[in-house]
Amino acid sequence: FGKHFAKEMNATFEGLPLGIAGDTTPNVLWRLKNGEMSGYESKVWWLILGRNDLALKQCSEEVVLLGILRVVEEILTTRPHTKVVVNGILPMTNNQEGRLTNQSHRPMPMGLLPPNRRVTTFWPSIVAINEQLKLFCEKHDDRITYFDPSDIFVQKNKRG
């Protein structure tokens, strides 16, 4: 990170990673609303959110989407001169070959699943959430940009 984003290492960009492993959108929103990030006045906030909400907390697509959008709203409201880049949710799978499956999937609350089984087919939900994030960013403020990570991380097979 340092060689690309640390000014003291002659980086082209200056940035600060503020992510916490296992964090969810409510955690980020709490920190924004309770002053933990009040000293950071950045020109651009790059948000990578939603993955833990979907995978760890088993939230529905709607809850994940609304959580991300609420964090965006909080940043834009409290930092009027800031731009926000909304990174789409990164691809994830439990397939040992790294293949993404297109099976239909609706996350279930944790209490409804046997303790040794969790929903692991996330790709359809990620696609649905990312499509809505992209639409939101295209329709709103010029201070919001969507970044599609699947362009980098997903390679289409011969069948599409």
Image (tube, rainbow, N blue to C red):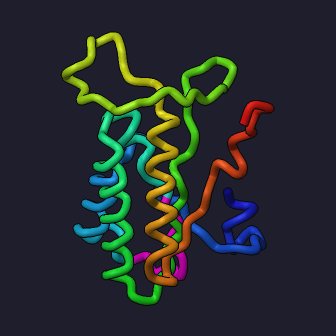
Q: Quadrant of the N terminus?
A: bottom right
User: At 32% from the left edge and 34% from the top edge, which residue is drawn?
Assistant: 58
Question: As displayed, is residue 64 above or below residue 13?
Answer: above
Frontmost residue, 21 versus 66: 66
Frontmost residue, 70 versus 30: 70
**Residue 78 image position (x, y, % from top left):** 32, 81
Q: Which residues are magenta?
A: 39-47
Instruction: Give the residue at the far bottom of this rendering.
Output: 81
* Quarter residue 51 falls in: top left
* Left or right position of 50 against 102: left
Total marks placed: 0
**Residue 26 image position (x, y, % from top left):** 27, 53
Question: As displayed, is residue 18 above or below residue 158?
Answer: below
**Residue 11 image position (x, y, % from top left):** 75, 70
* Quarter residue 90 falls in: top right
Question: As displayed, is residue 132 above or below residue 141?
Answer: above
> Is 97 covered by the magenta stretch?
no
User: At 36% from the left edge and 54% from the top edge, which residue is drawn?
Assistant: 65
Q: Quadrant of the C terminus?
A: top right
* Left or right position of 108 against 1: left
* Left or right position of 76 against 94: left
User: At 65% from the left edge and 48% from the top edge, which residue is drawn?
Assistant: 150
**Residue 36 image position (x, y, % from top left):** 31, 66
User: At 35% from the left edge and 32% from the top edge, which residue is drawn?
Assistant: 106
* Left or right position of 158 against 7: right
Instruction: Give the residue at the far front of this rendering.
Output: 159
